[in-house]
Image (tube, rainbow, N blue to C red):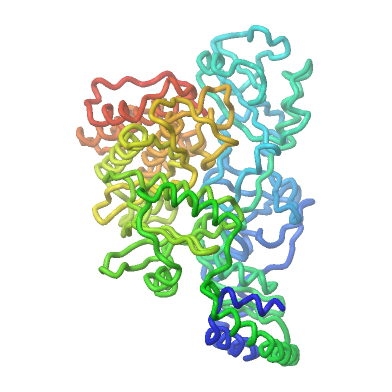
């Protein structure tokens, strides 16, 4: 009777077309445009680790499809250079290489460990910044499975009052006369005090277990055991395209290009399809057609009966739809135009042109009836309570600023949810400043990068102070900064945003939110301070410093700068970098210096030490002669 449930979704002519298509047997050979040697998908054992889909051997798949594709999810290529441990790269350079100690395919987790800690006597992960790049389909596990060790390096104190088991540890980078300490992030040790007395703070994820207990063995072997156990990441299957979902649903394996685009489906029968694998022989298909034909007559009567009902052909209702509808009614004076799902399909020409794909769903290009181009964001997560959908509608509808993207409409019809934005022809900032394969055409000038930095700062200042309800974004990163035809930046994606009363300073949140590498320290550990709009300031500072580092290819290829945490390296080489990056151009030197100094102020560990976005705008618009470097307290 599963077929009959289609009455909620398809009108009769369309249902008949679907049934006819199902009776056609195997696809034609036109569906198969790749040969069977597209790649190797057989499992492979490296050391004690079994490597199979969605992971793949990077050295064996480098030449597949003309060096453009891999069999598995992008970024999950594993090197097997010796027989002991396979290696996974979380970034470019040797300090971003991690040993794979195990892969759990049932729970979709991979266990990693720092090779220096695992095989040697290293006790400090100095200059080993653990981040998960946005391009990699991996993510840290929920906070109840992940703990953090905080290494405070180059500290001016020798003992911590009231902490008998926390003694100085030896770190290779310690300055003469300075000391280093390590504590779990959730311990009762006063982290703010340590942050002010130490020049660097390094955050390392570890497993959340008994090894994080501070006892008499803590400063000798306790934390080393935690480091050797490593940490776990999960692979993010929610980023799959619809084609990959269909492929895996037919017992196939997905092949992606190096740019993250689905290119083919590898089938267990040795064939390669550009859609999905066949599910059986023609004999089985004939049986299925007979069953379908018999079921058709039974469903016809049900279809005719329900066709007279007012809502017979609407999509199935989701359990949280009444909650969202109630929200829309209460805020009827603020939300933009509402469209039906049929309107959305019409404006996108049945989702013909895809602009991008993310964990939330996909974005398609469309046109309104007046000819304006739009970007249609289809939300695919219908299992939640609708918080992301309501966040975006509520927050963006309250805004009107040149540096905040405009929401033109939305769709809420059953399980179908869409957000309709103004179209940004130049895509996101990530395309121009952070693409490893970018060419000279995509390399923006320092002047343009500065304009983008100050425009984004003005947009954030408006969200924090200028609109009717104060908004904290919580997910500022290059991917969420869109660029119009004139490269004017616009802040987008308010799915994690929090709306606050203007008089509020602290914000209550349940669990960490944001993107790894951009999350402020107080968001994952309250001992660093209160969560507030200063959390956006931290994310903005990290983004600006990444803009600086990614702009100069000479620096990104420099062995010294690539092996060291970039904010720390740029702090120590500020003057030399500004001169070399600007090619002896005084005006450009000033712009670069402003971006770096402002970025370093924004990423101070303690929220109260960071400037407000209003102050950030003032510093960017002012003279560099009034800019002083902040204290060197950086979170790695």
Image: 368 above or below 531: below
Residue 495 in sight:
yes
Residue 479 in sight:
no
Q: Is residue 307 left or right of residue 394?
A: right
Foreground pick, 273 / 585? 273
Q: Is residue 612 left or right of residue 531?
A: left
> Residue at the location (40% across, 37% down)?
471
Image spot of residue 175 (x, y percent) = 54, 16
Residue 525, image quadrant? top right
Image spot of residue 315 (x, y percent) = 54, 69
Image spot of residue 539 (x, y percent) = 44, 36
How many numbered marks does the figure carry? 0
Foreground pick, 425 / 495? 495
Foreground pick, 492 / 418? 418
Image spot of residue 125 (x, y percent) = 62, 30
> Residue at the location (49% across, 24% down)?
605
Instruction: Check the picture and name the quadrant holding the N terminus.
Output: bottom right
> Residue at the location (39% across, 54% down)?
431
> Residue at the location (38% across, 47% down)?
396
Image: 203 above or below 549: above
């Amino acid at each position: 009777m599963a077929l009959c449930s289609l009455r909620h979704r398809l009108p009769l002519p369309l249902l008949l077309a679907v049934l006819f298509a199902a009776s056609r047997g195997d696809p034609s050979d036109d569906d198969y445009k790749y040969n069977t040697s597209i790649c190797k998908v057989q499992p492979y054992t490296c050391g004690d680790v079994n490597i199979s889909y969605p992971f793949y051997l990077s050295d064996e798949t480098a030449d597949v499809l003309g060096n453009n594709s891999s069999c598995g999810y992008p970024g999950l290529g594993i090197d097997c250079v010796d027989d002991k441990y396979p290696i996974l790269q979380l970034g470019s350079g040797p300090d971003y290489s991690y040993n794979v100690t195990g892969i759990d395919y049932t729970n979709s987790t991979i266990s990693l460990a720092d090779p220096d800690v695992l095989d040697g006597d290293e006790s400090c992960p100095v200059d080993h910044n653990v981040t998960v790049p946005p391009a990699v389909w991996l993510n840290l596990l929920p906070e109840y499975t992940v703990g953090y060790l905080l290494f405070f390096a180059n500290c001016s104190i020798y003992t911590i009052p009231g902490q008998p088991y926390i003694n100085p540890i030896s770190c290779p980078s310690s300055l003469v006369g300075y000391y280093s300490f390590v504590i779990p992030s959730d311990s009762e040790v006063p982290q703010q005090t340590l942050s002010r007395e130490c020049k660097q703070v390094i955050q390392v994820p570890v497993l959340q277990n008994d090894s994080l207990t501070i006892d008499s063995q803590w400063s000798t072997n306790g934390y080393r055991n935690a480091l050797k156990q490593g940490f776990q990441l999960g692979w993010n299957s929610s980023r799959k395209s619809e084609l990959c979902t269909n492929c895996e649903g037919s017992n196939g394996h997905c092949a992606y290009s190096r740019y993250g685009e689905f290119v083919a489906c590898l089938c267990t029968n040795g064939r390669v399809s550009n859609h999905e694998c066949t599910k059986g022989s023609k004999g089985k298909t004939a049986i299925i057609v007979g069953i379908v034909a018999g079921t058709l007559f039974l469903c016809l009567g049900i279809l005719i009966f329900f066709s007279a009902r007012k809502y017979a052909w609407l999509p199935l209702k989701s359990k949280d739809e009444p909650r969202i509808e109630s929200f829309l009614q209460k805020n009827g004076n603020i939300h933009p135009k509402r469209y039906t799902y049929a309107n959305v399909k019409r404006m996108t020409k049945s989702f013909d042109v895809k602009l991008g794909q993310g964990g939330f769903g996909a974005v398609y290009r469309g046109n309104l009836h007046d000819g304006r181009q739009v970007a249609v964001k289809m939300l695919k997560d219908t299992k939640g309570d609708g918080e992301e959908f309501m966040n975006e509608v509520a927050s963006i509808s309250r805004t009107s600023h040149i540096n905040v993207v405009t929401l033109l409409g939305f769709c809420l019809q059953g399980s179908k949810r869409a957000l309709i934005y103004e179209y940004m022809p130049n895509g996101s900032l990530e395309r121009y400043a952070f693409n490893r394969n970018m060419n000279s055409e995509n390399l923006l000038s320092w002047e343009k990068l500065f304009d983008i930095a100050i425009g984004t700062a003005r947009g954030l200042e408006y969200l924090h102070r200028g609109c009717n309800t104060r908004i904290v974004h919580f997910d500022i990163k290059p991917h969420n900064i869109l660029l119009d035809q004139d490269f004017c930046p616009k802040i987008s994606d308010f799915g994690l945003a929090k709306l606050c009363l203007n008089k509020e300073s602290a914000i209550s949140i349940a669990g960490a939110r944001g993107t790894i590498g951009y999350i402020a320290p107080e968001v994952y550990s309250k001992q660093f301070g209160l969560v507030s709009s200063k959390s956006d300031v931290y994310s903005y500072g990290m983004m600006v410093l990444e803009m600086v580092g990614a702009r100069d290819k000479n620096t990104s290829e420099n062995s010294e700068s690539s092996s060291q945490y970039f904010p720390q390296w740029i702090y120590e080489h500020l003057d030399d970098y500004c001169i070399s990056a600007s090619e002896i151009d005084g005006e450009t030197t000033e712009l670069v210096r402003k971006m770096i100094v402002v970025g370093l102020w924004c990423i101070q560990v303690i929220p109260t030490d960071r400037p407000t976005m209003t102050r950030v705008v003032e510093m960017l618009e002012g003279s560099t002669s009034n800019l002083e470097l902040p204290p060197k307290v950086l979170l790695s």
